[in-house]
Amino acid sequence: MAFRGIGGKKPDEGRGDWAQKHLNAEADPAPVGKLISQIHDGDKDLAFFWINQILEAEYAVNWDGERIEEFVHPEERSVAYAHLDQLQQLTRERERFVHLCDEFGIFLDEHAVQVLPYCTVFDLDRRYSISKKSFLSIHPGELDSFVKDTALPSEDLEIVFAALSLPADVFVTDDTRLTTCAMSLGLNFPLSPNAFCTGKEYPAKIEEERQRRQGQANEESDADSR
């Protein structure tokens, strides 16, 4: 099982401008930076406020011109129309974002990607691994000693702990500092330092793991036949 953490805010991994580079299709949601300039006149606080507040104001997007003419003072109608247009734009962006999240969920299902949320990783009642290799699972109660026994960066601690909780066979990351610090796992954890690889190294690492498993299966088969 391969593991890759989803999320994080590390500038050195280029995540800050990911949306600007890749969300270019007409159906994709606009990055927040674009919304700041196009809708909120450069006001960052207002842009982030409306990411959530649009959920409360969505009912207003169904207002038509007749309602504005009926309920809004003539001198303020132009402003009301402008606000309504902004709400409609933000609602469309919200719908596009939800659609993108749904597509990502479908992608995970189609590729049989197992999702391990934080609430599961740190569940103190969850003693065994969600995989069949339950005897290798690390318990949340061991987190304190895990912190003391390794030199992992604090911002990466939870994703490595999650990989241990599966336990994963391969850990994919392009963060070279994390790969170096992962050497502190030594041979005392179910996740080996050798399991860490970059995205480019991933195909070769998976083939290496496949051959290792096949070798184990052959040895077990030979032992059973004796």
Image (spheres, grey):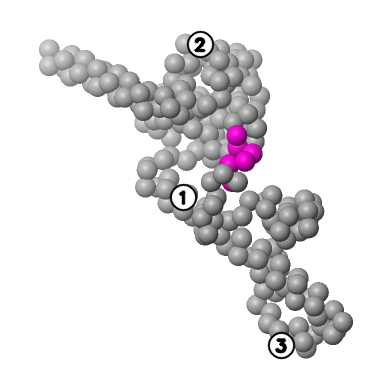
In front of the other: 226 or 207: 207
Which numbered marker is on residue 105?
1
Tell which circle, 1 or 2, labels the residue nearer the N-terminal end.
1
Residue 196: x %, y % from top left: 47, 21
Which numbered marker is on residue 186?
2
Mark toward the viewer: 1 or 2: 1
Q: Which residues are magenta?
A: 14-19
The residue pinned by badge 3 equals: 66
Residue beneath the point at 64% across and 32% down: 10
Amino acid type, label 3: Glu
For numbered disc 2, what is the local secondary structure?
loop
Residue 86: x %, y % from top left: 71, 67
Q: Is residue 56 magenta?
A: no
Q: Residues within 10 Å of mark 1 (few under 14, many from 20)?
A: few
Q: Quadrant of residue 93?
A: bottom right
Quadrant of the rendering where the C terminus is positioned: top left
Residue beneath the point at 43% across and 35% down: 130
Amino acid type, label 2: Gly
Q: Residues within 10 Å of mark 2 (few under 14, many from 20)?
A: some
